[in-house]
Image (cartoon, rainbow, N blue to C red):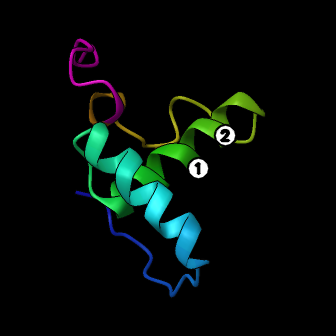
Amino acid sequence: MSDKKKFLLRLDENIYAALERWAAHDLRSVNAQIEFLLTDALRKTGRLKQQDGIDDRRENPDAAPPAA
């Protein structure tokens, strides 16, 4: 498992509440939801490539595992 960088994130209460509802709907923790949203945004803007060590199965559990 890769190491994770820890940092403090301050959010407006309304933003956190909306993220919490969204995460619950997607069966994720708030932390996993934020990581998912950031990863998605980075990929869509070309700032993060598929092979940068992010496992798509966390985002889409139905996805096939990567070929060895």
Q: Position of residue 46 (x, y in %)?
A: 76, 32
Alpha carbon distance from label 2 to label 1 = 5 Å
Q: x%, y% of residue 34?
A: 48, 56
- Give the residue drawn at x 54%, y 45%: 37
Residue with the mark numbered 1: 38
Q: State left or right for residue 24 relative to residue 53.
A: left
Quarter of the image for residue 66 reads: top left
Secondary structure mostly seen in the magenta stretch:
loop
In the displayed structure, would residue 41 be above or below residue 38?
above
Q: Secondary structure at mark 1?
A: helix
Question: Magenta region: which residues?
Answer: 59-68
Residue at 67% from the left image edge and 42% from the top image edge: 42
- Total labels drawn: 2
Residue extending furthest toward the right: 45
Which residue is depicted at the point 50% across and 32% down? 51
Answer left or right for 11 relative to 4: right
Say whether marks 2 and 1 touch (CB < 8 Å). yes
Q: Quadrant of the N terminus?
A: bottom left
* Label 2: which secondary element: helix
Q: Which mark is residue 57?
A: none
Left or right of residue 57: residue 30: right
Q: Residue at x 46, y 56 (%)?
A: 19
In percent of width and height, residue 48 lies at 65, 40
Q: Residues within 10 Å of mark 1 (few under 14, many from 20)?
A: few
In percent of width and height, residue 41 lies at 66, 40
**Amino acid type, residue under disc 1 in the picture:** Leu
Check if residue 64 falls in the magenta segment: yes
Question: Quadrant of the image for the C terminus?
Answer: top left
Amino acid of disc 2? Ala
Query: Quarter of the image holding residue 31?
Result: bottom left
Q: Label 2, on which residue?
A: 41
Q: Nearer the viewer, residue 14 or 48?
A: 14
